Every structure is written in C-alpha cells, then in structure tokens.
Amino acid sequence: MLELAIGIILGCCALGAGMAMIAGIGPGIGEGNAVAKACEAIGRQPESKGAVTSTMLMGCAIAETTGLYALVIAILLIFVAPNLLVDILLNSIG
Amino acid sequence: MRSKSRRLTAVDILLIILMILPFAIGILLKVLTAPPSEGISITGARVYFTIPMPIQDLPITEAQVNSVLVLISIFALCLFMTRGLKVKADSKRQHAVEWIVEKVEGLVKDSMGDYFAGFAPFIAAIIALSALSSLSSLLGLYPPTSDLNVVAGWAVLVFALITYYKFKCGPLGYLKGLAEPVAFLTPMNIISEVATPVSMAFRHYGNVLSGTVVAALVAAGLQGLSAMVFGWLPGALGDFPFLQIGIPAVLSIYFDVFSGCLQAYIFAMLTMMYVSGGFPAEDYEKRKEKKQARKNKQNNIHKENLEVN
C-alpha cells in the first residue's frame, strides 16, 4: 500500500511537471511574433537595425517570463516536491 | 598617433594575479569537496559548511562563495583598469576604460533621463557582476546566478531603490500612486508592485538554471549514446565517452555566453526602466517648486517682521 502511495506521488509529480511546461507554447508563439515583426521592421528600415534588435531582445526576455515561471514550477515538481511529499506521507503514517 | 601599451609593473602583475586567483580558488574548492559520484546529476548549490545561528543555521553554499569570489575578481579588475590614468589618454587600457564608461553613461542617460545620470556606476556594477557570475560557469564553477537566493538579493535591492524613488513625493504621493487610475484597482497595483522583484529574480535565475539543466541532460544523453555506439571498443576505450568531447561546448556558447550576457543586460535595463518609470518626475518638480515658494514666502515674512521691528 505504501509503495502504491509513493508511486502515485512520484507519478503525479512527473505528470504535473510535464503539464506545467505546456506554458512553453505561449512564450514560443509570442517571441516568434516579436522576431517576425522585428525582421519586417529591419527590412523596411535597415538603418534602425540596432535599436530594433535591442528592443526586440528586451521584449523577448519579458515575454519569456511566463515560460520561466512554468520551468521553475516544473523543476520544483521534479527535484523538490517528491522528497517533501514522501516525507509528509511517512510522517503522517508515523 | 598609435597608442602603445604600457609596460606592466609589479603592481599590475599582482592585480592580474588577484583577478585570476579567486576563480582558481573556486575551482580548487569545488574539486576538493566534490563527493565521489557516478555519472551526471542535477543538484542545487553544494553546502560547504554551516554557521550556527540562534534561529536557524546559516548554510554557506557554493553560490555564496562563488559570488564573493566574483566580487573580489571584479574589484581587482577595476583596480587594474583604472591604474595610472592620465588626463590625456595614452594607453590602450585607458582607452578601453573610457569607452566602457562612455557607453554605460550614454545607456543610462538614454533610458533614464538626466536626473538619474548618477546611476551609471550602479548599472555598470550590476552588468559586470551578473555577466561575470554567469560566465564563471565556463570554468566549471557553479554559476551564482543559477541560485535563486543570489538573484533574489539583487532583486530586493532594486525593489528598495524603486520604492525609494516612488517615495520622493512623500508617503501620501506613494499611496495616491497605488490607487491609480481608479481606487478599486488598488489590490491589483499592490500585486504588481510585489511582482516586480519576483519576476526579475525568476527571469534571471530561470534562464541560467535552464541552461545548466539542459546542458547536464545533454551531457548525460551523450554519455549513454557514446556507450551505445563505441561500447564495442576494447578495455578503457569502450568506457570513454567520445561524444562528450566538443558537442556540449556548442550548447555552452548559447546558454552560458549569449544567455548570460543577455540576462545581465536585461536585468540592468529593467532596473533602469522600473526605477525611472516609478519616479514621478513632474510631481517631484512641482513639489520642489512649491517648497521653494513656501520657503521664499517665509523668508519674506521674516524679513518684513524684522523691518517692522
């Protein structure tokens, strides 16, 4: 029974980590849009390349934030949560 | 006229040694305290030792030690670069320093305005510290920026600065700023206020950490792959991970060099944006004028009283 409980905990942590990374879709699309528009802008006005590039990198970094939140949660779920939850389970059993 | 490089003096050589020594110490510490482990594992910062404290023991981790080592190295670098400055630049070193200072001052003035021109040294310090911390992973050290505690410390510092400049119009002005544009949005504004340092810390830490994790996973995968492909070779040759040579370095160019420098730049840019964006410049000017007017008025009244007497 205990093995089953620990197995459920580990499996759910892995599943949760995988599901958390679905958030990676958003920043991917957003950064793709940003870079596409930046390319268009540079194509239209090649002399403004420097300003457009630095602004684009800045925007990309900010768009990436949600993806990084998901990454942090996934890493916590994989490396930190299982130990913590198993400890809680074992303590509650006594 | 071509500027010639000055000959190195004993002090210069000492400073160069001081620049390199911290990293050597870091590598030595890492090698000496490395636990005997099989394969590649992804762990947090290793705890070197703990200092007993009244409430909770204070663990001194790899990240803290490495960030102090980076600080010492930057300190020696600054001393080395600014040694023997002349009014008329005659050495390559001084030209390099002047270029850096001009670039940073231009950047700060462009994005923060003239009022914040004094921020240039702080911004340069943030960029240097963050970039060198991330780049120290090239030497095999644990990069301090991939530990949330280090970056959260910087983010708290930036948060204090932002709040300080928001308080420039007095506590009432700050509270009024929270209730804008309409009063019932106050909780939202408070949340976004707190979210600023959190997002800054997570952005920087997540980027560097993701590089570390991906690099470790790729290295582990290559180990397994080379065991599969070259496993038939006799003896020690069969155990040797041939595929691990060189291929992880390509990833390292993106994750360590590009991403590390980009994150340093972005952290500095966000600091500048938040600090100058949160500062109510117009209100501050008005307040200053009002204060000046009141002062003048009081002085005039004082003078009149004196004259009457």
Image (cartoon, coloured by chain):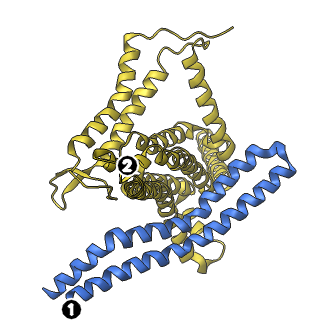
Chain colours: A blue, B yellow
**Dividing the image into 4 quarters, which one contains the C terminus of chain B?**
top right
Q: Chain of mark 1?
A: A
Pick out the residue farthest to the left. Answer: A94
Q: Name the kind of residue labelled 1 in the image.
A: Met
How far is mark 2 from mark 1, CA to CA? 41 Å
Residue at label 1? A1
**Dividing the image into 4 quarters, which one contains the N terminus of chain B?**
top right
Residue A88 appears in which quarter of the rendering? bottom left
| Label 2 residue SS | loop
Q: Nearer the viewer, residue B281 or B197?
A: B197
Q: Nearer the viewer, residue A36 or B296?
A: A36
Residue B190 coordinates in the image, percent (x, y): 52, 71
> Which residue is drawn at the image coordinates 63% and 55% (left, top)?
B277
Q: Nearer the viewer, residue B121 or B169?
A: B121
- Whether residue B281 appears in this view of the structure is no
Residue B198 coordinates in the image, percent (x, y): 47, 63
Residue B98 appears in which quarter of the rendering? top right
Residue at label 2? B241
Residue B184 coordinates in the image, percent (x, y): 60, 81
Left/right placement of residue B285 relative to residue B83 reads right
> Which residue is drawn at the image coordinates 52% and 62% (left, top)?
B196
